[in-house]
Amino acid sequence: MKKLRVFAINPGSTSTKIALFEDEKVIFSKNIAHDETELKAFKTVPDQLGYRRDIIIAELVKAGYTLTKIDVFSARGGGLASCEGGVYEINESLLHHARIGFTIMHPATLGSQLAHEFAQRFGGKAFVVNPPDVDEFSVLSRITGFSDIFRESRIHALNHKEVGIRYASSLGKDYYDMNLIIAHIGGGLSVAAHQKGKMIDSNDNVQGDGPMAPTRAGALPAASLIKLCFSGKYTEKELLDRVMKRGGWMDHLDTADGRAVNAMIAGGNNHAKLIMDATIYQISKVIGACGVVLEGKAEAIILTGGLAHDAYLVSEIKRKTGFLAPVTVIAGEFEMEALAAGAIRVLRGIEDVKVYTGEPVWNGL
């Protein structure tokens, strides 16, 4: 069988991750760090496209690689209308939404544009795999106590799906036949109920829901938050940053680094121990809620993300939640591997490629 060559692209706020695969094997990878002063020279995110493209090509040349004979360019994507999970061939509708930032303007939107440009220039297909815009929520999970506010899907979709597929495969099963609870535990934190291949419910990883995380506030009492908004102590931006970027461990301990928190605890810092234990408590509580969503039929609880390397955190979550289902650990993040694996599944005919229509999967009641 011919080996497939996949070039994976994952732009972030201050870096661009790239990786070249032959089948599932990485033959070259690089996390390109961008100088923030250079990024500030660009007025908008779309203005960075040429800059990032040229740096990618320069890094490949430096390492002795080219982008010729690539079967598919696979990107994380972003800024799209809500869509089902899967692999999408990049079309004009998807490109348009990425360029304008249909839902959000973030450097991730450059991924699909770079993949498309490289495919046009060097040949090959261009895909987006399980973008951040994946939304598979059930209708019940969306309803809140306000008639004009609905819960939205903001999950580490790419890593969630990859971990679910890997776990099912390790048992000789199909992810789309299983009920799983997957907790991605990193700088942000998402715990989702996976029912037969659909993420039907989860906490909102970004906007203040579920467990606190190293950089997120998690759920807050609404009335207290409203009072804080009108206290005059903070601007709107300051409070949004506190909720989405500097909440959780950052707010309590002024660090998002698990190693630093563990060092505090080892040094006798009782407050750091309290915050770690509260985080574990909150993660476990949401795992329990997902167990209810799956009506007691969860076949496994999977812990993933960078903090799943933390032995104490893992052991305590296992102790608290193991009665619901067996707990397994697939620590770390597999975003680049997921981009390659999704593209390869399509090229091998294991999974159908999807067509991006630009129509949101949810438009309210």
Image (cartoon, rainbow, N blue to C red):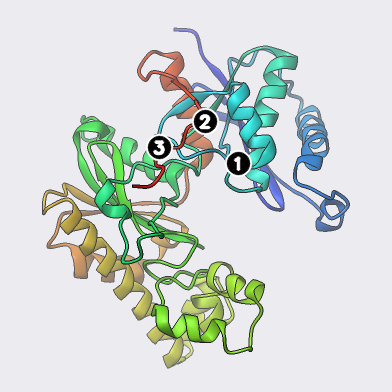
Q: In this view, does 45 lie to the left or right of 25?
A: right
Residue in the image at 40% along x and 37% along y: 361
Q: Residues within 10 Å of mark 3 (few under 14, many from 20)?
A: some
Amino acid type at mark 3? Val
Work out how far the residue at label 1 is from the one at label 2, CA to CA, in angstroms.
Answer: 9 Å
**Mark 3 or mark 1, which has the lower sequence index?**
1
Residue in the image at 56% along x and 77% along y: 250
Q: Tell me the element at label 3.
A: loop
Amino acid type at mark 1? Phe
Amino acid type at mark 2? Gly
Quarter of the picture holding the N terminus: top left
Q: Is residue 52 left or right of residue 3?
A: right
Q: Can residue 315 be seen in this view?
A: no
Q: Tell me the element at label 1.
A: loop
Work out how far the residue at label 2 is from the one at label 3, CA to CA, in angstroms.
Answer: 9 Å
Does residue 2 lie above or below 27 as drawn?
A: above
Q: Is residue 94 left or right of residue 213?
A: right
Which residue is label 1 attached to?
A: 102
Q: Can residue 8 be seen in this view?
A: yes
Q: Are marks 1 and 2 in contact (CB under 8 Å)?
A: yes
Q: Where is residue 27 in the image (x, y as percent from the top left)?
A: 60, 28
Q: Position of residue 322 (x, y in %)?
A: 17, 62
Q: Position of residue 20 (x, y in %)?
A: 61, 28
Q: How crowded is mark 1: few (under 14 residues within 10 Å), some or many (20 or more)?
A: some
Dot label at residue 361: 3
Dot label at residue 358: 2
Of residues 94 and 119, the one nearer the viewer is 94
Residue in the image at 76% along x and 34% along y: 56
Residue in the image at 69% along x and 36% along y: 99
